[in-house]
Structure formats: structure tokens, C-alpha cells
């Protein structure tokens, strides 16, 4: 027993020493180089990984273009869920001691991170989370340049009002918030959906839901989910069942997994989401730069642009008032930034002035539709 | 209404196809090889990879690539099945592990395999397809069913038929069941118990790849599908009778139909509740399932 | 050279010596009885020969070949077969399937049952198969081919075990209390089957408590007590030995 105890003690000692040394060396590096550390949390793997990676690359492009060598971004994976998101936030706030986090992507993750950044008094700036909840509970440290679904539901409700509508929504924070908000706005136009089906995350077989949709004789099917795969399966199975109607989806349609799963069934599907303004030369230049650097185009032009703007806004803030959460927060409320996504200013809830558009899948590409 | 029934049968066919191999292994070793779900999905990922390779770099057709991938992957995965028995289950058995321990070990392996798949292939969904175009299914009697779904049903029915014959009308099938009942007694009459178990694991794992690849055509591939499938398989095998081939068919179909009718009348969020409700009912009323081994 | 040679085998379970330096031989064509009080190690001896259990020390030779460490199914394949004390045909398969597995010419993994392809068997195998079928009828199991073994009566189960032994055509047969729990008519049947086996040149090692039957059937007996051999010879001589009497009276 003695020998085993010795070995155990020695191992524990080694581990402790390694941790301390490891921690020390980072701190030493900090002091000697004095780099400014920013955090990023986003869906680098999982359902929205294609967009998460766009965000990451956009940040890197913006940073390179700025020429700043004293800024470092620590990238963490949110796995598009609250648990991983809050773990990442914990680490960034408490271990890396950042003053600002760019993130998260999925609304579930962003919502989960709020208590941590509020307590840590760290700025959280999202370019992808659209849940209307964030407007209410975001708090004074939360900002986003992605438009709240509140605006998306407004646009959608105006589009499909007075028609026979079937709603198929995912049973999670995002899905239900969007669903309820949409129904409220539809009610203002005296429109009640003829079908209202809810599915659990990860469902793969939608045929029976679609059967009910068929029986309701709906003319429009709106799919509310933040999983591109689920979106894709619904549309694909709808086509296989021979359902003839107009399809609308939320911003997760931008994820490449949607078109991979739905294949040609994606043709003609409408999406309400922000879009890159290709009339703006700066936008085209950015997209070209992306393609040259990474040898492929972005999965989502729009979110690449938003994330790029975000990094630049942050850089501008740091330049103006230094790297301090309080100061940055106050500064952001005063700006009207001429970004590639448009003029960006923030209201008292942290929501920006950027609006979503109506897009349509044509020949495998999402293109804006004339209203 | 009829469409709901058809949906249930289609999904039930999928469940049944995976349950067949699961029951076959149970016949030989008398415990739940939970990792089976992940083994099949891993094989399907291999099929995907090979098809991709052939289609994108060798200029082969989608169907050729699929068949080729299926063949190679099935054989490789069949061998993997044997290795799992040889290096995980057999040593545990030899050291007197109880059936509960075997289940826990198998579950552990399932999780490890899933994480491995996620690491190697990534978390985003992979799609396997046989044609570049999605087509509307065939209409008959006001219900719609696609070519692939028909294929799955045919493969399921044929498999049930073939494997039932195999287990009950051939000498090797008798040997498999004998080994499952009492491997010592089987050895005493000269049955090569190890060889019999190897053969069982190979065949079952081979079949799992066929099943999973066909299923992937329907719902794409994600690393977590292994767990999802095996949970359904457990329910289906308990309903139908663990170890029985026709039990796999009936159990799978009943589960699929119950899920879909449940989704229709109660809403899709209750789908899993219906499935496990059915399981509980059967455990209470008829735990041995509908059919004997 | 003897057909079966047991050389100094020992086996302990948790410190309890089940077999202790046991040695004896069995010659081709003999019927040898193994007797002794309960716990003497008789069943353990059979388990040791078939290698269901590992031996701590010693060797076992069959026809000159060392079978001490060979896997059970291989030993069975070489021509040794055994029955179990509490009569165990494989329970959830039928009478026919049980016989199928035991049938001599099919110890390899094959697809078709012998009952299915008996028309295509070679002559020697045909003769053997026909004999089994006749015996099935003789012992009253002819109509029960598709009955599951666990649904047979106790006596019928033992008869099935004997038939499996015959079907295997093994050279050395280990019978573990083949008469226990049987009615007189069954005992007569089983005795006849044993005589038939011996007449066809088989070697038999028989564990039994019924002294009358042992005396009647066996050429020679071996007495075991506490894992050791305490006597070896013909029945009358051996049962007059003091140490044998002592062991049975529990001294």
C-alpha cells in the first residue's frame, strides 16, 4: 500500500506543478507581450458549424486587415447549446479575463451566457443570435448587430398574412419564442394558422406532421427551427409526399447543411434573414478576399459581413476608449457605424438598426426578392 | 389516415432492420450488444466516405459508389464486430462478468464509438444520395411512398425471411442457438463455440451496415444516430421478443406505427413518450415479448 | 497403450482439493465404473477430462495425444463425449436439432441438417443415420422429433442424451449417473444401450451410485474418495477392501 500511496502522491504533485507552471507561463507571456485578449464563442462544430466558421474567418480577416498585432482572439466552441456556451463563457471571463466576448451564435448559447457576462461585467456582442428574448433580458452589456427575430417575424407576418398557414416549430427556446411572437403578429392581421405542429430537437421523421399539414389544406408552410438539417429534412420529406405549397424558413436556412439535406427540394424556398448587399463594392471585395484566403466562398455571405463589421466596430471602440468593458459599452451606444451591413447603431436594449430581408433559393443560391 | 399508417410501417421497417442483427447476436451470446447501433452508423459513414471518394475523384456514378462503399464497409465492419467480441466481450465473460456488467461495457463502447465518429468525420450531418434529384414518391391508395422507402421495406422483409430460415433451418443456425443457450453443452457435442460466435458477429455487423446505409439515404448521418437507433431497437426487441427474427419485424412495425399515430393524435413532441410508454406496458404485461426465440 | 491415461492430475477450488494426484488408465473396449461417496470428485473428474475446468497439475492422454489443455469442442471432436448428472440436452431446441448437433459426421459448421440431407449421405453415414432413427422409435421418441428438449419428461431427456452419445459415434464415452431418477423400464433401456455401445467396440467410463448396476455392467471399478483413487480392480475384490468400506461408512 505504501508504494501505491507514494505513486499517487507523486502523480498528484506532478499534475499540480504542471497546472501551476502552465498557468504561470501564460501569465508571464501576458506581461511580456501585453496582448489585448478578446473572446469568441460560437458554433464551430455541430449544426451551424458552417456559419460559425464564417464568423471566425471574418474576424481573422478583419484583424489582419487592421494591421493590429497586439490583439488576440481566443476562439471557443459553443456546440450550439447552452451548456457548452456557458462553460466557454466561464473560461473566458474567469480564466482568460477578457473584457469583451464576440458571441454566441445560437440563441440558446447566448441566453445561457448572459448571467456569466453580467456578473463578470463583460461585453457580449453577437452577430448571429436572433431570439427576441435577448432584447428583454440581454442587459446593459449585451449588443448584437444581427436583427432580432422580432423584426423577422414582422417581415414574415406581413408576407403571409391572410393565407392558410401551417407552422412547424422546434421545441426549444429559439423555436417557441419565434413561434409565439409570429402568432401574435399574425393575430394583428386577423390571421390564425390552420396547423400548428411542434417537434422535438433531433427528430428525423416528419412525415406524420406533414400529413397533418396536408390535411389542413394549408397554402403556406413556415418551418421554425435553428437546425439546418431539420429544416432540410422537413422540406425534403414534404416534397417526397407531394405537398404543394410555399415554404418559408428562418435564418438557419443559410447553413450549408440545409441545401445538402434538402438538395433540389430547396429550390424555391423563402428565407427571412439578413443578406449581404452585393451592390456595395466593399462587400464584394470582402467576399473575394475570403475566397482568395480560404479557397472557398463563405457558407453565408450575410453573416460573414456581420461578423466582419463586428470585429471592426470592436477595434474602433478599443481605439477610441481603450480596452475596458464599461467604456466600450458606453461608446457603443453612441456610434453610427458605416459598415458593410449598413449603418449600424444600437438602441437601449443593444439591438441594432440592421434589418432582415426576404430571400429565395434560386439555382442553389439565396437571392433577395423584390418586395 | 392511411398515410400515417404507411409512415409508421416505413419507420417501423427501419427499426426492424436494425433489430434483426441485434436479435441475432442475442441468440448467440445472451446479452444486449448496445454498441451495435454505433457499429452500424460507423459502417454507414465508411460507405459515405467511399462513395464520396469514388464519385468525386474516380468519376464513378453515385449508385456504383454506394454499392462499392457498401460492400467494402460491410466487410470491414463485420471484422470490427468480431474484434469487439474478441477483445471486449469475451475477456469480460471469461472473468465472470454479469449481464449487467456486459450491458454497461457495451454502452461505454457505444459512447466511445460515437465520439470517435464525431472526431473523425465531424459533427455536421453527412448526406448520402443515390440520385442528384429528389423525386416525389409513388402514390397509392392516397398514401405516398418513395423508392428508397420501398427498398428499405423489401430489404427488411427479405432479411427477416432469410435470417429466420438461417436460424431455424440450418445446422449453423441451430449451433448459434445452442451456443446461446449453453455454450458448455454445445462444446461438449463438438460445436466450435468460438467460431460460431465469430460468424454471428460478422453477419450481424455486416447487416448493420446495410441497414444503416439505407437509413442514411433517408435521414442523412449524424454521429448521435447510433444511440438514437439502439434505443428504438431495444424497445422493438422487447415488444417482439428478444432473439426472434419475426419478433424483430413485428416489434419494429408496432413501434413505428405507435409512434406515428401518437404523433398524429397527441403531437409530435410526444413521440418518444409513446415509444417508451409502449415499452413499459410490455414489460408489465408480457416481458418476454410477442414471439419466442 | 491405454485409450485414456489420467496422470497425476490435481485440482483445487479455493483451497479444497477436488482432485488430488489422481492416476489411472482405461483400456480400449473396457466398461469402467467410477464409484465413491458424494464429494469424492467424480463429476470434477469428467469436467477435467473435457477441460471444462483447468487442471492445477498433471496430464491427460487420449489415444496417446495430450488433451490436458485442448479446448472442449476439440476434445469432443477427437472422439470423447459425456453426459451430465442432471440430464442436459440443449433445452430450447428440438429433439431433432439436438441430435443434429451431436451427429458424428457434422462437427464442422455446415448449413444443412443431417435429417434434411440424409438421402445424400455416403453409405457409411447412411447406415449410422438409419440406426439412430430406429433407436429413436425403439425408445419412444420417434414421434417427438420436433418437441423442444425442455418439454420432454426427465426420463425421455436422459434417453435423448444416450441417443446423442450414440449419434456422435465417439470412441470414449463418459456417463455421469445415467440411471439416476429413472423408472425400471427406462433403466432396462439404458442398460441395453450401454451394452450395445460396448458391443460395437466403444469404451465407457461410468459414474453411478447404484451398486447393483455397477456390478452387473462394469468390467472393473475405480473407487474415489476426497479426490484420490483408493482402489482399482474388479468389483468383488475392491468392495471387500477395508479402505473402501471405511470410506463409504464415513470414517
Image: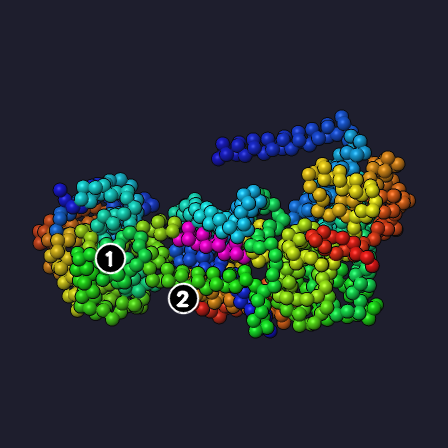
Colour option used = rainbow
* Badge 2 density bin: few <14, some 14–19, many ≥20, Cα 10 Å: some
Q: Nearer the viewer, residue B87 or C243?
A: B87
- Residue drawn at (39%, 47%) of the image: B94
The picture quadrant where one finds residue B181 is bottom left
Chain to which the residue tagged by mark 1 belongs: C
- Mark 1 and mark 2, same subunit? no
Whole-Å distance between the Cαs marked 1 and 2?
26 Å
Is residue B18 something one can see in this rendering?
Answer: yes
Q: The residue marked by circle 2 belongs to what chain?
A: B
Q: Which mark is residue C103?
A: 1
Q: Position of residue A32 (x, y in %)?
A: 76, 26
**From where the camera sits, is residue C162 visible?**
no
* Nearer to us in this view, A80 or C186: A80
Q: Quadrant of residue C162?
A: bottom left
Write down the residue under mark 2. Answer: B292
- Residue C148 horizontal side relative to residue A153, left or right: left
Seen as rendered, the residue at the extreme right is A334
| For the residues bearing labels 1 and 2, Cβ distance under 8 angstroms | no
* Main SS category, magenta section: helix
Callout 1 secondary element: loop
Instruction: Give the magenta part as a residue range.
Output: B200-216
Q: Residue at x 79, y 56 (%)?
A: A369
> x, y (%) of residue C139?
19, 67
B36 on left or right of C36: right
Foreground: disc 1 or disc 2? 1
Amino acid at each position: 500500500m505504501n508504494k501505491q500511496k507514494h505513486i499517487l502522491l507523486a502523480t498528484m504533485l506532478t499534475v499540480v506543478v504542471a497546472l501551476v507552471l502552465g498557468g504561470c507561463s501564460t501569465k508571464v507571456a501576458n506581461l511580456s507581450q501585453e496582448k489585448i485578449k478578446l473572446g469568441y464563442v460560437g458554433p464551430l462544430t455541430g449544426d451551424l458549424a458552417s456559419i460559425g466558421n464564417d464568423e471566425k474567418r471574418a474576424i481573422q480577416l478583419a484583424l489582419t486587415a487592421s494591421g493590429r498585432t497586439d490583439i488576440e482572439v481566443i476562439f471557443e466552441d459553443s456546440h450550439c447549446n447552452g451548456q457548452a456556451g456557458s462553460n466557454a463563457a466561464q473560461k473566458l471571463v474567469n480564466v482568460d479575463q477578457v473584457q469583451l466576448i464576440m458571441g454566441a451564435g445560437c440563441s440558446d448559447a447566448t441566453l445561457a451566457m448572459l448571467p456569466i457576462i453580467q456578473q463578470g461585467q463583460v461585453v457580449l456582442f453577437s452577430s448571429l443570435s436572433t431570439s427576441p428574448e435577448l432584447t428583454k433580458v440581454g442587459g446593459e452589456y449585451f449588443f448584437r448587430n444581427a436583427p432580432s427575430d422580432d423584426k423577422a417575424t414582422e417581415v414574415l407576418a406581413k408576407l403571409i398574412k391572410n393565407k392558410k398557414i401551417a407552422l412547424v416549430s422546434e421545441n426549444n427556446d429559439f423555436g417557441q419564442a419565434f413561434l409565439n411572437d409570429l402568432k401574435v403578429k399574425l393575430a394583428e392581421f386577423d390571421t390564425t394558422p390552420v396547423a400548428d405542429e411542434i417537434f422535438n430537437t433531433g427528430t428525423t421523421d416528419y412525415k406524420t406532421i406533414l400529413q397533418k399539414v396536408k390535411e389542413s389544406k394549408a397554402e403556406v408552410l413556415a418551418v421554425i427551427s435553428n437546425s439546418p438539417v431539420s429544416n432540410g429534412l422537413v422540406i425534403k420529406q414534404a416534397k417526397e409526399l407531394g405537398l404543394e405549397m410555399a415554404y418559408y424558413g428562418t435564418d438557419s436556412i443559410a447553413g450549408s447543411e440545409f441545401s445538402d439535406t434538402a438538395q433540389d427540394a430547396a429550390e424555391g424556398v423563402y428565407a427571412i434573414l439578413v443578406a449581404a448587399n452585393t451592390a456595395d463594392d466593399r462587400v464584394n471585395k470582402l467576399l473575394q478576399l475570403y475566397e482568395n484566403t480560404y479557397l472557398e466562398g463563405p457558407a453565408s455571405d450575410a453573416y460573414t459581413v456581420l461578423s466582419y463589421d463586428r470585429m471592426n466596430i470592436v477595434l474602433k471602440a478599443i481605439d477610441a476608449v481603450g480596452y475596458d468593458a464599461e467604456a466600450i459599452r458606453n461608446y457603443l451606444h453612441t456610434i453610427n457605424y458605416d459598415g458593410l451591413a449598413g449603418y449600424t447603431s444600437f438602441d437601449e436594449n443593444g439591438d441594432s438598426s440592421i434589418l432582415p430581408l426576404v430571400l429565395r433559393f434560386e439555382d442553389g443560391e439565396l437571392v433577395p426578392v423584390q418586395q | 389516415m392511411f398515410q400515417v399508417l404507411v409512415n409508421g410501417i416505413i419507420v417501423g421497417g427501419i427499426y426492424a432492420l436494425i433489430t434483426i442483427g441485434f436479435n441475432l447476436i442475442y441468440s448467440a451470446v445472451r446479452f444486449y450488444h448496445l454498441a451495435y447501433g454505433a457499429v452500424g452508423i460507423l459502417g454507414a459513414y465508411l460507405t459515405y466516405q467511399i462513395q464520396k471518394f469514388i464519385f468525386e475523384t474516380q468519376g464513378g456514378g453515385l449508385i456504383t459508389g454506394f454499392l462499392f462503399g457498401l460492400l467494402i464497409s460491410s466487410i470491414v465492419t463485420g471484422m470490427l464486430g468480431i474484434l469487439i467480441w474478441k477483445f471486449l466481450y469475451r475477456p469480460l465473460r471469461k472473468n465472470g462478468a454479469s449481464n449487467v456488467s456486459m450491458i454497461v461495457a457495451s454502452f461505454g463502447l457505444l459512447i466511445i464509438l460515437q465520439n470517435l465518429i464525431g472526431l473523425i468525420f465531424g459533427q455536421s450531418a453527412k448526406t448520402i444520395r443515390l440520385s442528384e434529384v429528389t423525386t416525389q414518391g409513388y402514390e397509392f391508395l392516397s398514401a405516398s411512398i418513395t423508392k428508397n422507402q420501398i427498398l428499405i421495406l423489401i430489404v427488411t422483409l427479405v432479411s427477416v425471411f432469410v435470417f429466420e430460415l438461417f436460424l431455424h433451418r440450418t445446422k449453423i443456425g441451430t449451433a448459434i442457438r445452442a451456443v446461446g443457450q449453453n455454450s458448455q453443452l454445445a462444446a461438449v457435442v463438438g460445436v466450435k463455440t468460438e467460431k460460431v460466435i465469430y460468424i454471428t458477429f460478422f453477419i450481424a455487423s455486416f447487416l448493420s451496415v446495410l441497414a444503416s446505409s439505407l437509413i442514411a439515404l433517408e435521414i442523412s448521418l449524424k454521429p448521435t444516430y447510433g444511440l438514437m437507433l439502439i434505443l428504438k431497437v431495444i424497445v422493438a426487441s422487447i415488444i417482439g421478443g428478444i432473439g426472434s427474427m419475426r419478433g424483430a419485424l413485428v416489434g419494429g412495425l408496432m413501434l413505428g406505427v405507435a409512434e406515428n399515430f401518437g404523433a398524429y393524435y397527441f403531437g409530435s413532441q410526444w413521440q418518444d413518450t409513446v415509444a417508451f410508454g409502449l415499452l413499459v406496458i410490455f414489460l408489465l404485461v408480457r416481458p418476454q415479448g410477442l414471439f419466442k426465440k | 497403450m491405454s485409450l485414456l491415461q489420467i496422470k497425476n492430475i490435481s485440482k483445487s477450488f479455493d483451497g479444497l482439493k477436488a482432485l488430488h494426484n489422481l492416476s489411472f488408465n482405461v483400456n480400449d473396449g473396457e466398461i469402467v465404473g467410477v464409484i465413491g461417496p458424494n464429494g469424492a470428485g467424480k463429476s470434477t473428474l469428467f469436467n477435467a477430462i473435457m477441460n471444462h475446468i483447468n487442471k492445477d497439475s498433471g496430464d491427460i492422454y487420449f489415444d496417446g495425444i495430450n488433451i490436458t489443455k485442448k479446448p472442449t469442442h476439440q476434445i469432443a471432436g477427437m472422439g470423447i463425449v459425456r453426459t451430465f448428472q442432471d440430464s442436459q440436452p440443449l433445452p430450447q431446441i428440438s429433439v431433432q436439432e439436438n441430435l443434429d448437433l451431436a451427429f458424428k459426421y457434422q462437427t464442422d459448421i455446415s448449413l444443412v441438417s443431417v435429417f434434411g440431407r440424409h438421402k445424400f449421405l455416403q453409405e457409411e453415414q447412411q447406415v449410422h443415420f438409419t440406426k439412430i432413427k430406429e433407436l429413436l422409435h425403439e425408445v419412444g421418441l420417434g414421434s417427438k422429433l420436433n418437441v423442444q428438449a425442455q418439454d420432454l419428461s426427465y426420463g425421455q431427456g436422459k434417453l435423448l442424451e444416450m441417443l446423442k452419445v450414440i449419434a456422435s459415434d465417439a470412441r470414449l464415452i463418459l456417463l455421469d449417473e445415467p440411471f439416476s431418477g429413472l423408472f425400471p423400464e427406462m433403466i432396462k433401456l439404458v442398460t441395453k444401450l450401454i451394452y450395445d455401445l460396448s458391443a460395437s467396440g466403444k469404451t465407457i467410463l461410468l459414474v453411478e451410485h447404484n451398486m447393483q448396476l455397477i456390478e452387473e455392467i462394469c468390467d472393473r471399478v475405480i473407487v474415489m474418495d476426497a479426490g484420490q483413487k483408493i482402489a482399482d480392480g474388479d468389483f468383488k475384490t475392491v468392495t471387500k477392501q477395508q479402505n473402501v468400506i471405511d470410506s463409504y461408512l464415513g470414517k
